Image (cartoon, rainbow, N blue to C red):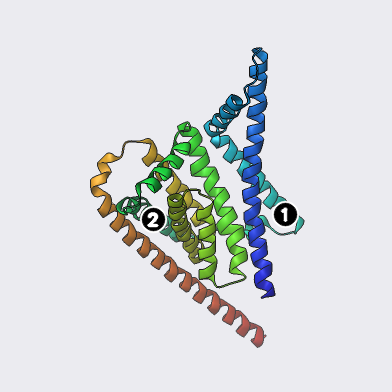
């Protein structure tokens, strides 16, 4: 029980650190934009309308959401890096950033394609309440409304790396030491879904996070889940910025084919993991035998 509380507490601290960094980045951006807007109004010799300035600042923050996310990532990763240095641990080992084989990378690519088809297109087949769908679309518009290069940099590169390090790296690794892996995966996925806002966004992110977590467990490395996260976000970005109505008629087929491909890829990952573990066990036995003989 003591270990459960200790590791769960560490996981919670890493999670809260990430949330606090988001708040700091948002408030800091609001202060900067508020200062600039205040100077602009004062230089025009006009009386400062607090409500108008506040609304303008809010619009500025939403219009520069990419900058806020960049600040959040830099702040959070910086804190995590400093903590690992203080504890004299290696950052890459703490979050399981390990080299993987070409075979694993190929399976990761197939799993990515499968998850995109199953989760992204499968969601369209579920009759969710209209208000939940509208909230999800509105949330997506905040990102897709940014300049495309900025959306690509933030959502397809920076955010996936940061979120994988936080959730499948620090948070999951601590929970996995305190409880069964399946329970750690579920809790991590729920936390991952919670930070994405609206109910439907949280549901979709939670399922997606669970898939990333399963891949992380089966491959033993964070690199495949980072790749999957990048490809998934890139696909979502493309689908939201370009006309893909021609795909609507193929949605059921894409979702089913994606599900089959995803399950098959994960099955092959599981088999590959078992083969690796068997070889490692044989190597250990061989080393022990040689040691005894010597």
Read off the residue under disc 1.
83
The vertical placement of 290 against 80, above or below, is below
Q: Specify the quadrant that holds the C terminus.
A: bottom right
Give the structural element (helix, strand or loop) at label 2. Answer: helix
**Which residue lies at the image location 38% right of the left edge and 36% below the top edge?**
241
Residue 98 is situated, as x and y percent measured from the top left of the image, at 57, 59
Disc 2 crowd rating (10 Å Cα; few below 14, some 14-19, many 20+) is: many
Task: Give me the C-alpha separation between circle 2 and circle 1.
Answer: 34 Å
Residue furthest to the bottom in view is 293
Q: Earlier in the sequence, mark 2 or mark 1?
A: 1
Viewer-nearest residue: 160 or 273:
160
Is residue 41 found left or right of 145 in the rendered image? Answer: right
* CB atoms of marks 2 and 1 within 8 Å: no
Residue 100 is situated, as x and y percent measured from the top left of the image, at 51, 59
Q: Quadrant of residue 93?
A: bottom right
Residue 149 seen:
yes
Residue 142 is situated, as x and y percent measured from the top left of the image, at 47, 37
Residue 102 seen:
no
Is residue 282 found left or right of 135 in the rendered image? Answer: right
Read off the residue under disc 2.
115
């Amino acid at each position: 029980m003591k270990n459960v509380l200790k590791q769960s507490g560490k996981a919670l601290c890493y999670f809260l650190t990430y949330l606090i960094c988001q708040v700091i980045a948002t408030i800091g951006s609001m202060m900067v934009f508020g200062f600039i807007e205040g100077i602009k109004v004062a230089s025009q010799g006009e009386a400062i309308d607090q409500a108008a300035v506040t609304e303008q600042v809010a619009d500025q923050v939403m219009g520069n959401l990419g900058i806020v996310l960049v600040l959040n990532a830099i702040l959070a990763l910086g804190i995590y890096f400093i903590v690992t240095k203080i504890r004299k641990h290696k950052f890459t080992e703490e979050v399981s950033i390990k080299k993987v084989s070409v075979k694993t990378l190929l399976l990761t690519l197939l799993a990515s394609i499968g998850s995109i088809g199953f989760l992204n297109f499968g969601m369209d087949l579920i009759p969710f309440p209209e208000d939940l769908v509208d909230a999800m679309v509105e949330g997506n518009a905040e990102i897709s409304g940014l300049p495309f290069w900025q959306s690509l940099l933030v959502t397809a590169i920076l955010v996936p790396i940061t979120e994988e390090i936080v959730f499948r790296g620090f948070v999951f690794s601590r929970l996995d030491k305190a409880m069964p892996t399946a329970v750690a995966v579920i809790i991590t996925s729920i936390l991952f879904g919670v930070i994405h806002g609206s109910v439907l966004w949280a549901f979709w992110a939670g399922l997606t996070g669970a898939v990333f977590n399963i891949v992380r467990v089966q491959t033993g490395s964070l690199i495949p889940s980072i790749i999957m996260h990048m490809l998934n976000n890139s696909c979502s970005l493309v689908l939201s910025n370009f006309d893909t109505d021609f795909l609507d008629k193929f949605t059921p087929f894409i979702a089913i084919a994606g599900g089959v491909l995803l399950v098959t890829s994960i099955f092959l990952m599981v088999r590959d993991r078992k083969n690796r573990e068997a070889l490692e066990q044989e190597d250990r036995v061989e080393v022990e035998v040689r040691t005894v003989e010597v």
